[in-house]
Amino acid sequence: MEYEAVIGLETHVQLKTKSKMWCGCANQYGSEPNTNVCPVCLGMPGVLPVPNEEALRKTVLTGYLLNCEIPRYAKFDRKNYFYPDASKNYQLTQYDKPSTANGFVEFEFNGKGSENGLAKVRITRAHLEEDVGKLTHFDRTSGVDFNRAGVPLLEIVSEPDLTGADMAYEYLNALKEILQQGGVSDCDMEKGMVRCDVNISVRPVGTKELGAKIEIKNMNSFSGVRRAAEYEINRQIEVLKSGGKLIQSTRRWDDVAGITEEMRTKENAHDYRYFPEPDMMPLAPTDAWLAEVKAQVVELPSARKQRFMRDYQLPAGDAEVFKSNIALGNYFEGLARQAKNPKAVANWIINNLLAKLAEATEKLAAEQAYDEPLTPSLSPSDGERVAQPGEGLAGLKFPPAALLELVALVEAKTISSSAAQQVFAEMFATGKTPAAIVQEKGLAQVSDTGAIEKFCDEAIAANPAPVADYRAGKVAALNALKGQVMKLSKGKANPALVGEILERKLKG
Ligand SMILES: [Zn+2]
């Protein structure tokens, strides 16, 4: 019997806010332990939570980005349990009335569960809750840091639409890209901003009923999810094939050993005794508030890629560059709308401009590194960010129209493609217009047939050997003569014309 896997993911994502969910403490990674805390996030008796409006906004914004419905009524509930990283003994979350529901994520994937290279995974809900503190275990004691307690956390629950480990991996990457580009979360894996629980079951191919759901808890890397899912799918199939039975249970992934281990089975699963949070009013977003949030929705990366391929006839590789580098894509689009040949504009941006910008960024970074003292920063997260090549666009010395002018000069054969490289380097460095540079450096291509005929005659007279070779049938010998003509014209002769004229003269 053949088996297939059915996977659903619960992804926890920290929202990008200045302060925590219910208090004014900083939502900041890397501070000294227990310095971003107050009576509210420490769960002292008598305190009252005040919702962070920016977190509510980013939750609904996520809903829009994930094509969700936004219910007009949502509420918070207490999920009761004891654990040392949660001092309140409950977590505030949304149980039966979440802020968003019934969405989907579309992403590029080739394999089972995809159609024409695209896969669609339904999103059950994305609900808002709070993060808990962080435990650190020492030799004989443990420490708890409550800086993370109360940080707004979004739980994004997918339907069991994933068919395998690779698809789960691609889904997570797509989700991360949407949340980052949508401005909802930084999704920094190193800082634990994204964690997920993976629900896996297997069933005989052709059956509809789901097998026993087995959950792998607390995965903090996408590659880990892929390896754990691969392992777990094979393990479950092995159990069934050897006549065993699977029961609903929770497992943990041992990354070093590369195996999953059982933590608990359904028999002793938690009962969280959810009840509505009595200290909080239900949420009832108004039309005006929803419209304000909706105005923040940006075009999603995959939609943008598809649109660039369709509207500007770009190959997938070019569109991919503009998909992930928003600033560069906007720059391209500004020019492509006015260009006769958007593909030529894309070539210049991707092959030349991007390289020059990267060079400039590297140079700047090297200079800054030289200026700074060599003591390493204590809190690497504070204010430290890596510049993206796209950011250099604002500082370009030439106006965007100059690039269009350059493309037009090449297409009109006024300059050769090698001269165009020189013009580009010069306009990048000085901001002069292409026309001025062509004039100043005398780069205009010679398309005057009379002048080229003269150079061709000279080259033929001075190089009898290649001439004889060519006439004897060695077609490649023409290149040697072409080279001579280009040299005589100081590189300015139109190469296509040179070829035509040489051939005519040698055959005649
Ligand atoms: Zn606090």
Image (cartoon, helix red, strand yellow):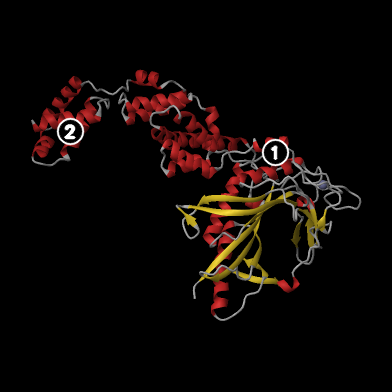
Q: Which residue is found at the position 65% from the left and 38% from the top?
A: 294
Label 1 SS: helix
Which of the image's four quarters has the C terminus?
A: top left
Q: Percent from the top left, x then y, of residue 55?
A: 73, 43
Residue 489 appears left or right of 209: left
Q: Percent from the top left, x then y, of residue 455?
A: 18, 24
Task: Compare marks 1 and 2 and give the one earlier in the sequence.
Answer: 1
Q: Amino acid at mark 2?
A: Leu
Q: Percent from the top left, x then y, of residue 89?
A: 83, 59
Which image quarter: residue 230? bottom right
Neighbourhood count class around disc 1 (C-alpha, 10 Å): few under 14, some 14–19, many 20 upward: some
Front position in the image: 81 or 16:
81
List the single residue furthest toward the right.
46
Front position in the image: 83 or 98:
98
Q: Which residue is found at the position 24% from the left and 23% from the top?
A: 447
Looking at the image, can residue 185 be seen? no
Q: Which residue is found at the position 22% from the left and 26% from the top?
A: 488
Q: Which mark is residue 481?
A: 2
Q: Amino acid at mark 1?
A: Leu
Residue corresponding to mark 1: 290
Residue 489 appears left or right of 314: left
Front position in the image: 258 or 268:
268
Residue 203 appears left or right of 247: left
Looking at the image, can residue 135 be seen? yes
Tally the marks. 2
Neighbourhood count class around disc 2 (C-alpha, 10 Å): few under 14, some 14–19, many 20 upward: many
Q: Mark 1 against mark 2, which lies toward the viewer?
A: 1
Label 2 SS: helix
